[in-house]
Image: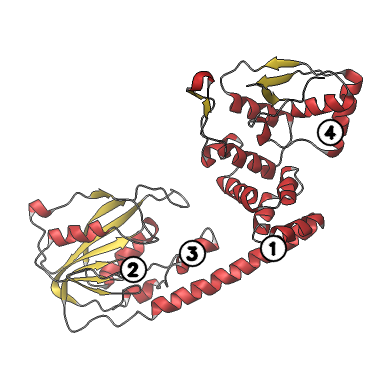
Amino acid sequence: MTERLEYHELANIFPLIQGVEFDELVKDIQWNGLQEPIILYEGKILDGRNRYNACLQANVEPSFVQYQGAEPLSFVVSLNLRRRHLSESQRAMVAQSVANLNDGQRRAKGGSIAPAFSQVSQPEAAEMLNVSRESVKRAAKVAKSGDDSLIEAVEQGQVSVSAASDLTELPKEEQKTIVLQGEEEVLKKAKEIRQQRSDLKRKERLAKIFEISKGNSELPTDKLYPIIYADPPWRYEHSETDSRKIENHYPTMTLDDICALSVPTTDDAILFLWGTSPKLEEAMLVLQSWGFTYRTCAVWDKQKIGMGYYFRQQHELLLIATKGSFPAPAPENRPPSVFYFERGEHSAKPHEVAEMIEKMYPELPKLEMFCRSAREGWTVWGNQSDT
C-alpha cells in the first residue's frame, strides 16, 4: 500500500468507531471486500476513515473516489447521521466540533485566499445536529476542560454530556479516575457537584438579598411629589428554573405589600408604573390602591426575546395613571407610545425612559420608587437604591 493518508478535519468531527463494532467491520471487509469507496477531498479522507483503517488491518487494498460536491461539511454530517445511531450527547459533541471549525479560509494555490466552508455558529451547529443549544454549550465545556478519557467516554456514548460537563469542574486527573470507575460513579459524582453548586448559589443569593435589604428605608414623608415613577418588585408564582427566579436578583414583594405602600403624592399627580404582561391585572390594582386612575400605556420593545408560557416576552408595559386634575404634557414633549431599547441587566429599565419623563414635565419634582441607582434631580427610594 501507498503512504498512509491523513484525515480531513471535517471527517474528524465524528469519532472513530472502536471495539467490537470496528472488529466486525474488519471481518466484513476480509470476507466481502470494500463495498463502498473511500471519499477524498483536498488530498485527505473526507469520508471512510473507519473503512480505510479496516482495509489496512484486513490487508485489503482500498479504493478511492474524489468528492465532487460544494458542501463538504453538510455532506459529512448527513452521511454520518444516516449511518450511525448517535445519542444526543454524542451529537452534541459533534456539534461543538462543527462550531469550532476555522473560519473557512484556506490558502489556495498561488497564495490567494479561497473559501472552503463557512463558519458555523453554536446555534446553527445545534440545529444541524438536532440537539439543544444547551447541550452544545455543555459539549464545548467538555471539549475545553475535560480529560481525554472523559471526552472519549462521551463521544463513544458511555457518559452523558450533562454529567461530563459537571465533572469538568474537577482536576483532570480526578476526572480520569472517576471515568475509569464506570458510568455509575460518574453519575454519582456529577450529582454531588450539582448539589454543591446549588448550595453555593443559594448562599450567594441569600447574601445578595441581605445586602440589598440593608438599603431599604421608609418612604419619604416630609415632601409630596406630583410625579411618581415606579418599578415594583413583582413576585412571580412560577419560574421555569431555579436559576431564573426573581429572588435570585432582588427581594420581591407581595401584591398586598405593594398596594399597602403610602405613596407621598400631591392631590394632583401622575404615575408612571412598570408592569409586565403577566402582572398587568395586578398593576391595575396597585395604581388604584395608590389613588390613581388609569389613562394610557406605552410599550418598551426590548429588542431581545425572553421566556414565557404563552408568548415569549419581548416587551414590557409602562402604565400612565393620574389623580386629581393633572395636565397632559405639552404637545412637543409627548413621546411615541412605543420605544426601542435593548434589554440590560435583569429588571433594569432603560435610562432613556426617565429622560422622557423629564422632558414631559421638566419643571416638577419627581420620586422614583424601587430605584436601582440615584438620578440627578430625582428623589429615589426602594429595594436597590442607597436611600
Report the mark closest to the observer, 2 or 1.
Answer: 1
Sort mark 4 into few (<14), some (14-19) or many (20+) by Cα contacts within 10 Å: some
Q: Where does label 3 land, which residue?
A: 245
Which residue is tagged 2? Answer: 232
The amino acid sitting under disc 1 is Lys
Residue 182 appears anywhere in the view: no
Give residue 322's quadrant in the image: bottom left
Which dot marks residue 306? none
> x and y percent of residue 224 in the render?
16, 78
Amino acid type of the residue that numbered disc 4 sits on in the rendered structure? Phe
Residue 370 at least partly seen: yes
Residue at the image point whose x is 30% and y is 64% from the top: 284
User: Which class describes the residues within 10 Å of circle 1: few (<14), some (14-19), or many (20+)?
Assistant: some
**In the rendered view, would you say 167 is above or below 128?**
below
Label 3 Cα crowd, 10 Å radius (few <14 / some 14-19 / many 20+): some
Identity of the amino acid at label 3? Lys
Residue placed under numbered mark 1 in the picture: 191
Q: Outermost residue, front direction? A: 110
Amino acid carrying label 2: it is Pro
Q: Position of residue 220 (x, y in %)?
A: 23, 81
Real-space Cα separation, disc 1 to disc 4, in angstroms:
33 Å
Q: Is 239 situated above or below 213?
A: above
Give the mark, 1 or 4, whose residue is nearer the N terminus: 4
Label 2, label 1: how far apart the Cα atoms are: 37 Å
Residue 351 rendering spot, x and y as whole percentages: 26, 59
Mark 2 and mark 4: Cα distance apart in space: 63 Å
Tell me which label, 2 or 1, sits earlier in the chain: 1
Q: Considering only order in the chain, which callout, 3 or 1, is on the residue closer to the N terminus?
A: 1
Q: Secondary structure at mark 2?
A: loop
Q: Within the image, what quadrant is residue 235 found in? A: bottom left
Task: Identify residue for label 4.
Answer: 22
